[in-house]
Amino acid sequence: MKLRRSSTVQVALTLTVLAGIVLAGTGAPCARAQTETQAPRRAEGAQTQAAEASNEDSQDPDPRPGSVSDVFPFGVYASGNGPVPTMAAAGASLVDQIDTLCRDLRAHNFDTVWINNLSSEFLPLWLAKGREHGIRMVPQGGGMPMYLLNQGWWEARWESAIETQVKPFYEELAHKHRNDPSLLAYSIVEEIPPDSPFFPHIADITRRVADIDPHHPVIVLYNRATSAERAVREIQPAVIGYDCYPFFTNSRSGPVSHHAQRSYYERQIARFSRAAASIDAQLWIMAQSWGRTAASDQADPAYRGMRPPTRAEMRYQVWAALFHGARGIFFYAYASNAQPNRQGYYDEHFLDYKGQPLPHYDEAARISRRLDPVKPLLLRLRPQADVEVVYWENLEQLHGRTFVHELTGDRYLMAFNADVEKEQPIDLEFGYFPHYLAATDHFHDVLSGVSYEGRDLRNVVLPSGSGRLFLIGGPEAWERHLAWETTTGNNR
């Protein structure tokens, strides 16, 4: 069985701890002992509903989807066959669970679901509910042919199955769903090592699908920078996905102090960012929303493994990702089993084991709403060191970086407070090369429209874990910014 786990667990966690990470409801694709022709088992009611939704899918939806590069997804990872475990335990149908999930995500300003462990016959149900509620989907299967496997029963069969099953499956999928606006991308596998034999096959499938369906790319969620770097060389995907969970409770498993967590999280994202930027791929970050809660006093603290992020750490994860050029944010995960694991801990996510929302879910919603006006802008900004206006950072926790708008050529400053305990002023030093920052240049807050001189920015305080975005330039630059905003439908 493939375990869905933190990306730092692969070396340090013991096998016992790893076993406890399996999520009933949001777990990873498992290596099922299925035959090459055997379909997954399914409920009769869901089968009928899926068939009805499939008939609807056969009609080309309208409007047609745009490029994935025009979408800034803000989403969550959820189980494809039982996304709301408390509802499933009470006997609710899959379609009712999907409907509840989509309504809840919309209420929290989420717009995308990374559907995990999905039986392919249920994809039409998800897409139909996506169209109904305005939610996009990134489907990821639970086994061959939708999800690549080369272990267990598939160890001696996987290569021939890719030719006879996987490639025809994805070609048919692309033909069927190429015009569906509720589909965002196809996730074919996750967390593969850099020496995986899948790479040339993924490259071929990526090209085949793109020829049929240029709107929805084949993607992979990586947890190692070396794997992403190989993908850039051999696959050149439209999207690089990275999952990273930094908030551990035991130093034998992963980083515990904020300094260590920052070092791990930001260094890895920086490598993924460079890889994605080298081919101008979208960088999507799968951040942490999960942790463990003891089911009783007998639970051994050594096996807790992970803790849920604080509100400030939720902000930190998002702004650190944006600072490194991320153009999409997801969280692992939505909900998990209502039963504790073998170590006596509940795996909890945005919902606790009783199905109730946790505080960091509300914070994620607040972050998404706060970012709404600038999500189209974030898709067009590229870090550009050769026009950097920041010369020196006086504060260890305060970062500044210059971005350039790919269409207008105007420069933007992103200031980011990595301190998750305290607010910090934007105490940045500008200049060194005077022609990079003219005396007439101001910093225009793109959310509020307030204009600052460089020295005045030191009076602007960033809350813990938060960031801010400023246009650099005079009145003409601000007018260009406003004019460009109107082209995105983001009228003030």
Image: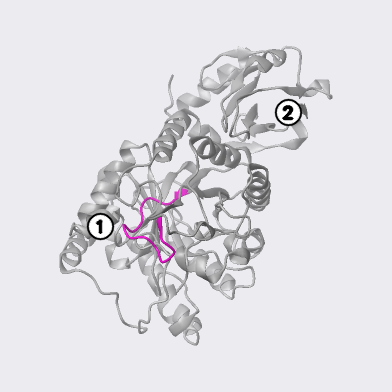
Instruction: Provide the residue span drawn in magenta.
Output: 331-346
Q: Quadrant of residue 251?
A: bottom right
Residues 86 and 120: in front is: 86
Q: Is residue 429 magenta?
A: no
Measuring 59% from the left and 33% from the top, which residue is drawn there?
407
Direction from residue 394 to residue 374 in the image, left or right: left
Q: Secondary structure at mark 1?
A: helix
Hey, which residue is sitting farthest right in the picture?
A: 432
Characterize the local packing of mark 2: few (<14), some (14-19) or many (20 or more) Cα atoms within 10 angstroms: few
- Hey, what amino acid is under mark 1? Leu
Q: Secondary structure at mark 2?
A: loop
For the stretch drawn in magenta, the main secondary structure is: loop
Residues 486 and 96: in front is: 96
Q: Is residue 202 above or below residue 64?
A: below
Residue 385, position as x, y percentages in the image: 74, 36
- What colour scheme was applied to this rendering of the protein? one colour
Residue 204, position as x, y percentages in the image: 53, 70
- Hey, what amino acid is under mark 2? Leu
Residues 37 and 44: in front is: 44
Q: Is residue 465 above or below residue 221?
A: above
Q: Any mark on residue 283, and which?
A: none
Give the residue at mark 1: 125
Look at the image and tell me whether residue 105 can be seen.
yes
Direction from residue 467 to residue 165 in the image, left or right: left
Residue 343, position as x, y percentages in the image: 44, 64
Give the residue at mark 2: 395
Q: Is residue 392 above or below residue 111?
A: above
